[in-house]
Image (tube, grey):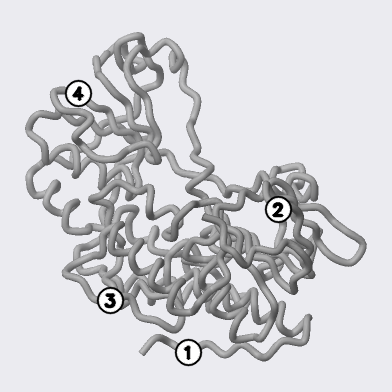
Amino acid sequence: MISASLHPGLVDVLVIGGGQAGLAAGFYLRRAGLDFAILDAQDQPGGAWRHAWPSLRLFSPAQYSSLPGRPMPATEGYPDATHVTDYLAAYEKRYELPVHRPVHVETVHRDTENLRVETDHGPWTARRVISATGTWWQPYLPHYPGQNAFRGRQLHTTGYHGPHAFHGQRVVVVGGGNSAAQIVADLSADPDIETFWATLRPPRLLPDHVDGRALFEIATRRRAAVLAGTADGGGVADLGDIVAVPPVRAARDRGHLHAHPMFDRLTTTGIAWPDGTRLDCDAIIWCTGFRPALRHLAPLRLREENGHIRISGTHADAEPRLHFIGYGDWTGPGSATLIGSGINARDAVDTIARELGGRPVHHRRPQ
């Protein structure tokens, strides 16, 4: 339900999105003493994590997956989606963050001095806006010939909810990243499902010893290099593409993590390669990534000819009153992770606080 305190009007800062990045922004905005509100399109806390498949795992243990101020409770191994959702709900409650839901942001416009945000529950006006809508709501699907002719089921990562819907079927999983590997591991554990993995390039698993500490340290070094203007040393992808979380290791050890070259077209009954080889299948799961969910910003006309939005720090060059957090490397190395979204949010709020006369924001690691 919509919060009873929802009164659209003028605020110092309006945060669009109540997932992990939006909550981190709320933590720092409260510390800065600014008047703010968080608008979330979901009807419950948890952001995109509420929509993930049950076996999805974080790439880092709980101690390296915390938002600012409050450690994630420990759990055995790598936290699953339910553990993360519960943590985000508790975090929001602990800091009494002013999250209003479900509120759908439709568009953002320039006013004379402020930004006007149109929603399905009335307009808001804000001196600054932080967009924290993430990428889950903008799945990317590549185009392949014959896609409309295929008579089986096609779905994106966002539509996968576990192996139960594929019993007795042959399923093709497309993509060479973490989501694809985890879904292959999930499906291949069921002996009643035949799993076929197709990738553009041979997938590379990170070494087993690269755990949450290593992931965090690599992202931290990369961020420091970017801020210092020195050569970007690259991220985790320099070591490999896929984090070997326990289910992926188990699939590898079973011999089920074998990838095949990418097909070039679909047929009515499956997939086909340039040499004429064909494979019939019942379903295709496209684990082909995401794009930033930014349709609400279209009236601002921020995109350049190449389709990108140029930013400096966290704000848009063409609209300095608008900040972006939590979208991955575009807004800061590791910013799509829990701990990285906190760093990204701190940087945005620190800038906003200086501009609006708020209290300084000092980062303190969770104890």
Q: Nearer the viewer, mark 4 or mark 3?
A: 3
Rounded to the nearest whole Å, what is the CA distance between mark 4 and mark 1? Answer: 49 Å
Q: Which quadrant is the C terminus positioned in?
A: bottom left
Please provide percent x and percent y for residue 32: 64, 85
Q: Nearer the viewer, mark 3 or mark 2?
A: 3
Q: Secondary structure at mark 2?
A: loop
- Give the residue number, with chain letter if any, for mark 4: 170
Comes first in the chain, label 4 or label 3? 3
Relative vertical location of residue 272 with respect to residue 311 in this rendering, above or below: above
Rounded to the nearest whole Å, what is the CA distance between mark 3 and mark 2? Answer: 37 Å
Could you tell me if residue 201 is visible in this image? Answer: yes
Q: Residue at image x 38%, y 77%?
A: 217
- Give the residue number, with chain letter if any, for mark 2: 309
Q: Mark on residue 73?
A: 3
Could you tell me if residue 308 is visible in this image? Answer: no
- Give the residue number, with chain letter if any, for mark 1: 364
For the residue pair 328 and 236, the one nearer the viewer reads as 328
For the residue pair 197 and 364, the one nearer the viewer reads as 364
Rounded to the nearest whole Å, what is the CA distance between mark 4 and mark 3? Answer: 38 Å
Q: Residue at image x 79%, y 63%?
A: 125
